[in-house]
Amino acid sequence: MFSQNDVFSDQAALKQVQAEATDVGHAAGHKNMAQLIQLRWIAVVGQITTIAGVTLYFDVSLPLPAMINVLVCLIAFNIASELRWHEMRAVSNGELLLALLVDVASLTAQLYLSGGMMNPFVFLYLLQVILSAVLLEAWSTWTIVAVTSACLAGLALFSTPLALPPDHGHGITSLYVQGTLICFALNAALLVIFITRISRNLRAGEAQLAHLRQRAAEEEHIIRMGLLASGAAHELGTPLATLAVILGDWCRMPQLRRDPELHEDIVEMQTQLQRCKAIVSAILMSAGEARGESSVRTTINTFLTDLVNEWQASRPIVSFSFDNRIWHDAPVVFDSTLKQMICNVLDNALEASPQWLSFKATREGDSLVLLVLDAGPGFAPEMLRQFGKPYHSSKGRSGGGLGLFLVVNVARTLGGTVVASNRAGGGASVLLTLPLKAIRLEEAVLDAH
């Protein structure tokens, strides 16, 4: 059964899904910025180590005051980045581009002060280009390529080579060859570590976005069904009234009253017809109401007891076990959506197992846990894999499977879960877990104000 407040609820859920998709994109950008900040700290440590080693061990003369000033500026920028991105979540492509440009500028300054193109660490430019190809949009990547190429050309034109011994032909003992090997190893290690992390962030973000897109499609599907159901409720009023009049006439006909079995069938038809009229009336009464306006303030035990009594009175169940183990009652607010969800699970179980059904209610911490057991054939493996997806029915009907789809979506909207499984001794089990914070009276009252 659908109501207009269900439609409003699903529209709110759809907006929430869209907001979550935006948050996913922000989270991925934030993680990538954190990777750049971490890489910059490694660059600071590496530059300090290299400058100290070259100066003290190899006795190479470097302009230390100027190089230290570049390091201080880089450290200050990284501290500012840490402070800024510690709280802010959204990271744009332009901000990532700026961060990489600062790294390129810092590297260029240090290379200019330490030999320019003759410095073996000039190949670290490739690290910036590859990172930009992974992190940035296409135009930004080409910007990094152009900037690094210009920096290389500038170093070739204006920098002063270091006064190193001419030992390039000495192989591994050559200072330049050793620096080139260290640069290659450093480049390779950093690329493997950080590209792996960044790729993992991107894959996780894409997987979560795909999940959210699927949720958004499901929410839109529910909204369309809710609108169709609301319109159908208006149309069903007249034919149901006509059927009620006809059945009333049949009950008063002497030839039908003399047949006990036929009379009993007519009475049962009237009972089911009244149930249909009550469902339609509930839809029409709730039409135009926002979520929460038709909610009922009650307690957990009262709600469950009333629901079970009403459900059991209108269903032909042979043996039904209701085990309520909620010893500490609590004031809550329930609306028709939650009631429909629980009845839907019970109806599915009843159809699979008309002879026996069990309904158990417990409270685990801050969650309401409802367990429905039946003695039917259980779920097929394909049904368990597609549980909660629309049009995957356990009844073999074309176009069926919407009941459990709605159950899963209502539970998810409330922050809960639905888990289906097959019992070891035969039959099926459906476990509903709902957070009490979603239905507590205190929070509902605050939300109403």
Image: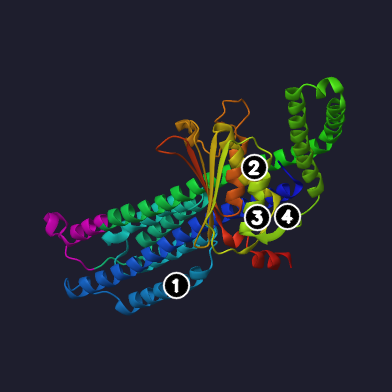
Residue that label 4 marks: 291
Rounded to the nearest whole Å, what is the CA distance between mark 4 and mark 3? Answer: 18 Å
The span shown in magenta is 163-185
Q: Amino acid at mark 4?
A: Arg
Rounded to the nearest whole Å, what is the CA distance between mark 4 and mark 2? Answer: 27 Å
Residue situated furthest top in the rendering: 255
Residue 396, picture quadrant: top right
Residue that label 2 marks: 312
Q: Is residue 177 magenta?
A: yes
- Residue 303 marker: 3
Q: Earlier in the sequence, mark 3 or mark 2?
A: 3
Q: Amino acid at mark 1?
A: Phe
Mark 1 vs 4: CB contact within 8 A = no
Quadrant the N terminus occupies = top right
Residue 409 point in image, percent of width and height = 60, 46
> What element does badge 3 sit on?
helix
Q: Amino acid at mark 3?
A: Phe
Q: Where is 51 relative to 214, above or below?
A: below
- Residue 77 marker: 1
Q: Earlier in the sequence, mark 3 or mark 1?
A: 1
> What element does badge 2 sit on?
helix
